[in-house]
Structure formats: C-alpha cells, structure tokens
Image (tube, rainbow, N blue to C red):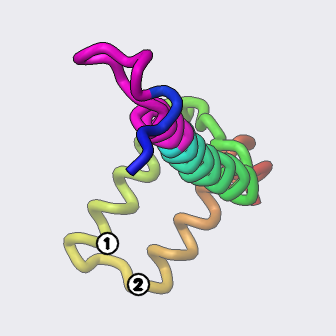
Amino acid sequence: MDLPPYAGRLKAGQPGPMMAMSSLAMAWSLLGLVLAVLAVVGGVWVTRTLRGRHHGPRQIRAAEPPSVQEAREALRMRYARGEISREDYLQGKVELEDCDPVARDAR
C-alpha cells in the first residue's frame, strides 16, 4: 500500500488536507446560515415596515377645548343615567365631533 505524497511532510498534530477541507466547508456552511438568518430578519422588517405604511400615519389628536370636554362628559352622564336614548347619545357624539376641527379633518 502506497502512502499519500503528503504523508511524510505532516507532523503530529498538523491538520491534513481533509481537515482543511472540512474547515473550509464548515466556514461556508456558517456563512450560509448567517445569510439565511439575515434574509429572514430582513424579510420580517420589510414586511412590518410596508404593512405599517398601509395603515397610514398615526394622527395625534389635539386636546379638546374645555367646553367640548364638558359637553361630552355631560352627554355621557345623561346616557348613563338613562335620561336620553342611544340614538340621542350617538347623535350628540356626532354633533360634538363636528365642533372639534381635528376630528372633522380625520373623517
């Protein structure tokens, strides 16, 4: 049986050509795994970013004037006590939203 040509040049503890190939293959496998993880993370980020744009920008609601706040509270309390019907309550809410320019622009 003939020995391979590199057999005489290797010393104890030195990696042979097969070890070098397995290290290279392991490095490429690790690189592939890292790229796959980056692709998944990037896909999730792109999906969330694009999906967020379809919902439109978040609107920051300005504080209501005190008179509108008081009227809204009085309407809510009258409805809670049963003094007005549901239809009257909903109509009052619509009318109060018409008083608020921010709510009117959001529609």
Tell me if 9 is positioned left or right of 13 in this view.
right
Instruction: Indicate the secondary structure of the residue bearing disc 2.
Output: helix
Q: Are marks 2 and 1 in contact (CB under 8 Å)?
A: yes
Residue 79 circle label:
1
Q: Which residues are magenta?
A: 7-28
In this image, 23 relative to 32: left or right?
Answer: left
Point out the tag, 2 or 1, that comes first from the N-terminus. 1
The numbered dot on residue 86 is 2
Residue 104 within the segment the image draws in magenta: no
Q: Give residue 39's position: percent from left, percent from top.
A: 62, 48
Whether residue 8 is situated above or below residue 98 in the rendered picture: above
Does residue 78 appear anywhere in the picture? yes
Q: Is residue 13 one of those drawn in magenta? A: yes
Residue 92, given in percent of the width and then of the height, sits at: 54, 67
Instruction: Identify which amino acid the numbered label 1 is placed on.
Output: Tyr
Question: Where's residue 19, x and y in %?
Answer: 40, 34
Q: Position of residue 27 (x, y in %)?
A: 50, 34
Of the residues shown, which amino acid type is indicated by label 2?
Arg
Local crowd size for mark 2, using a 10 Å CA cut-off: few (<14), some (14–19), many (≥20)? few
How packed is label 1: few (under 14 Cα within 10 Å), some, or many (20 or more)? some
